[in-house]
Amino acid sequence: MTPATAAAQVLADNASDVVEVSLLPGWREADGTHMAALRITLAPGWKTYWRAPGDGGVPTRFDFSKSYNLDEARVLWPTPEVFRQNGLRSIGYRDEVVVPLQLDAQADADDITLHAYMDFGVCADVCLPVNMVLDHTFAAGEVSNVDLIEAAFADRPAPAETSGLHSIECDISYGPEQAEIAISMELPQLPGRNEALVIEPSDPSLWVSEPKVTRDGDRLSAKAYIAKPTGEPFTLDLSRTRMTVLTTQMGVDIPGC
């Protein structure tokens, strides 16, 4: 096994012929941050999902807690595609995706030993669950796959402040079973087609409907419903409600309202 395809063992035999995952070791920054990546390669016709997979997708979950000399791990998702099937929206990737990992070492000069669990889904006409163990020791002095990881890092949704977002307003009204959120933002039309909005509350247990998006010049408006599946009352923290505007060519990341 070469360093460029470090250990990534598929534990779900029923998915091993449709998805392959490898770790790209990357490099260590001067501040102790190690840049690495996951490369996910899918068989034709199959797809996997973004951090917010939509009602038709399968969420991806990571557990890095068993790793050594790792203070924090951040998954830096590239801009995804929007898919529609059987009346449901899903958000993710087809063919191949490189997902950068930003690993913060506890001791900057020491190796990071990654022992992580990854649960995700791959779908075509059916969906299959995949459970993986990711094992690799990232040496402080190694350098590899720089161009591939940097390209994936640059392909993330652009920050709002560099994308022409001039203003954003959010209003929420609470009902007995669900809330309605209304969003209005001044954001120039993005390149590409099929403009869509993804709303991610800071509370992952909340369900959010697909927003209905309209545009009038530079004004993008959207409405969506939010509910707690258990039926419990809730309060939405608008300042920590993340939004992403997506087209077929780019995305814009808006961290709160």
Image: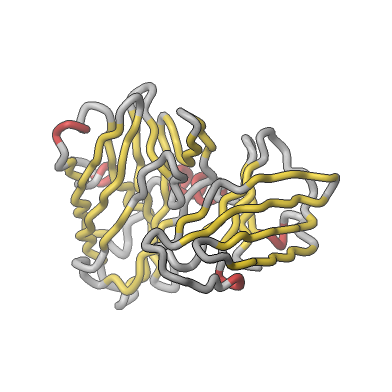
181 displayed left or right of 202: right
Nearest the viewer among 248 and 199 is 199
Q: Position of residue 252 (x, y in %)?
A: 64, 52
Query: Going by the picture, which residue comes out furthest to the bottom?
Result: 107
Q: How is this picture coloured?
A: secondary structure
Quarter of the image with the C terminus in it = bottom right
Nearest the viewer among 83 and 56 is 56
Q: Within the image, what quadrant is residue 15 found in?
A: top left
Instruction: State whether residue 119 is above or below residue 232.
Output: above
Query: Going by the picture, which residue comes out furthest to the top?
Result: 44
Q: Position of residue 89 (x, y in %)?
A: 50, 38
Quarter of the image with the N terminus in it = top left
Nearest the viewer among 175 and 86 is 175
Residue at figure coordinates x 78%, y 64% from the top left: 167
Residue at figure coordinates x 64%, y 59% from the top left: 159
Instruction: State whether residue 147 is above or below residue 110.
Output: above
Exactly how many numbered labels are in the figure?
Answer: 0
47 displayed left or right of 216: left
Q: Position of residue 100 (x, y in %)?
A: 42, 52
Residue at figure coordinates x 23%, y 58% from the top left: 116
Query: Going by the picture, which residue comes out furthest to the right?
Result: 217
42 displayed left or right of 129: right
Nearest the viewer among 55 and 74 is 55
Residue at figure coordinates x 17%, y 31% from the top left: 14
Q: Position of residue 130 (x, y in %)?
A: 23, 42
